[in-house]
């Protein structure tokens, strides 16, 4: 969702309400896990690559704000990364599955 909000051209983005509806369960999960000691990794999760969007012909924003948005959401992204790892996955597992679809 961060990629859609920060890198895709505004005219090609889904409506904010739709993105919010997808983001809400993740926020809820992080709230539920608030008391659970997730190992927050020292490193930040990697930024999603834009190349797949370019290859698919998705219009990109003239000035993507992906890095700025990632910095603003750093703690949240690290908590999600900790949850992903604790569940036995890697951050790139989701990227490789998305590329297959």
Image (tube, helix red, strand yellow):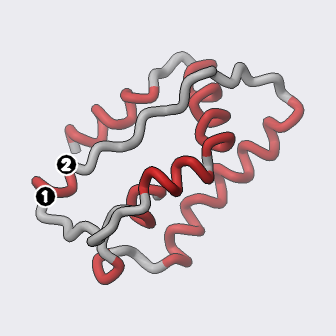
Q: Residue at x 42, y 61 (%)?
A: 65
Q: Residue at x 57, y 48 (%)?
A: 71
Q: Residue at x 55, y 77 (%)?
A: 17
Q: Label for residue 26?
A: none
Q: Quadrant of residue 36?
A: top right
Q: Quadrant of residue 48?
A: top left
Q: Is residue 58 left or right of residue 27?
A: left
Dot 2 crowding, Cα within 10 Å, few <14, some 14–19, many 20+:
few
- Check disc 2 and report its element: helix, strand or loop: helix
In the displayed structure, 82 sits above or below 61; it is above
Residue 68 horizontal/vertical position (percent): 50, 55
Q: Is residue 72 left or right of residue 69?
A: right
Q: Is residue 94 left or right of residue 38?
A: left
CB within 8 Å, label 2 to label 1: yes
In the displayed structure, 72 sits above or below 59; it is above
Q: Label for residue 56?
A: 1
Residue 52 horizontal/vertical position (percent): 19, 48
- Check disc 1 and report its element: helix, strand or loop: loop
Q: Is residue 79 left or right of residue 5?
A: right
Residue 92 horizontal/vertical position (percent): 37, 28
Residue on which the image places disc 2: 52
How many marks the image carries: the answer is 2
Q: Residue at x 13, y 58 (%)?
A: 56
Q: Distance between the Cα atoms at labels 2 and 1?
A: 6 Å
Dot 1 crowding, Cα within 10 Å, few <14, some 14–19, many 20+:
few
Give the residue furthest to the bottom: 11
Residue 4 horizontal/vertical position (percent): 39, 63
Q: Looking at the rendering, in which quadrant would you find the C terminus?
A: top left
């Amino acid at each position: 969702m961060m990629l859609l909000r920060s890198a895709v051209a505004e005219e090609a983005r889904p409506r904010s309400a739709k993105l919010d509806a997808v983001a809400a369960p993740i926020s809820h999960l992080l709230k539920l896990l608030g008391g659970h000691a997730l190992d927050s990794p020292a490193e930040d999760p990697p930024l999603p690559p834009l190349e797949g969007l370019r290859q698919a012909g998705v219009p990109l924003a003239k000035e993507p704000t992906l890095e700025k948005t990632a910095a603003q959401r750093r703690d949240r992204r690290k908590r999600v990364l900790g949850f992903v790892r604790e569940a036995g996955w890697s951050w790139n597992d989701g990227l490789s599955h998305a590329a297959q679809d």
